[in-house]
Image (tube, rainbow, N blue to C red):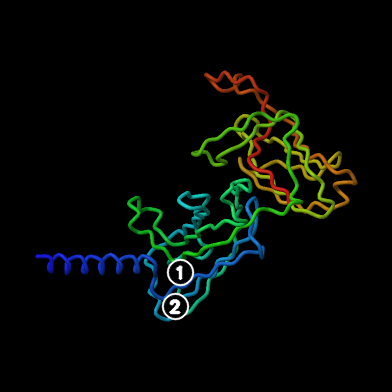
Amino acid sequence: MRRWLSILMIMWLIVVLGSCQKKMQVKGLELTVGFAEKTLTDNLMTEMQYRWKTGQDFVRFDRDLNVFVHFWHKNNLLFQDDHVPTVPTSSWEPGKEYTYVRRIYIPKFIDEFDPEFKGEETLKLVVGLYSPFDRTGKSKTEVLVKNLKVLPPPPDTPEIIYENGWYDLEIDPNAFLKQWRWTAREAVCVIDNPHRDATLVIRGGVNQEAVPGQKVIFKINDTVLDEFVPQESAFEKTYKITKDMMGDKDEFRLIVTTDKTFIPARIIPGSKDERELGVQISFIYFR
């Protein structure tokens, strides 16, 4: 009896291990990824390159698949960048290479004051393919699993302080922006001056139904950086901020202003929100 149990256990392990290996592979398909930054840190925006390479034994997909990109910290899904590849997978052919670049943001997650922190953390990157029409998860196939070393940001990383004209942070996992702060007609951030050129990224949105044709204006100190009318409800803007634009002081001001505001209680039935709202700002990145 024990002999039969042992045989059954071995057969079960073979089946399980075999299925795990199949889950990790798509025949004739390889993926390599790279990052624009040589050293990855948290609180970092960087470009991530995907290079899909098909071999001669690649069997063409009969449908379009999406790409899932998951970054795990221990047992927690820290963030993800699921997307549709630039060339539909149903068009992929044997012996080809498909390369594209996407921007990702590694959020702040490292606690440098944790007694167990040893100077770096590890993120597990899992990339694969899945059908967007499959709700069972059975179509999900892992193609790449890779550990990434992540360090804390450099000591001179500028701090951003939301000073005047900002409402409290709001979070809605089901909303497109996920989290945001509303501005009043004008809102001011105070940012450490790194005394070098830096990149500024602002992600936000406007309520086009409440205030159609709303203009958004960004200023660095008293100089207009940009003014625009968003064509869609959400926007993302990237700017190269030069050393001269920030001035000689140890801090500079980023000003977000708009030409139109609205009060939800006056235009939305049932709303009791009497705030004067301008622009939704989901994310400000400066490094």
Which corner quadrant holds the N terminus?
Answer: bottom left
Q: Quadrant of residue 282?
A: top right
Give the class, few, some or many, for how many residues have Cα within 10 Å of label 1's Cα (few <14, many ≥20): few
Q: On the picture, is 238 further left or further right than 93?
A: right
Find the residue positioned furthest to the front.
115
Q: Residue at x 45, y 69 (%)?
A: 91
In the rendered structure, which amino acid carries the disc numbered 1?
A: Ser
Q: Position of residue 38 (x, y in %)?
A: 66, 65
In the rendered structure, which amino acid carries the disc numbered 2?
A: Pro
Find the residue positioned furthest to the right.
248
Q: On the picture, is 187 further left or further right than 30?
A: right
Q: Which residue is mark 1?
A: 91
Q: Position of residue 152 (x, y in %)?
A: 65, 53
> Relative to residue 160, is residue 95 depicted above or below?
below
- Residue 94 is tagged as 2
Mark in the foreground, 1 or 2: 2
Q: Identify the element where label 1 is drawn.
A: helix
Q: Quadrant of residue 276?
A: top right
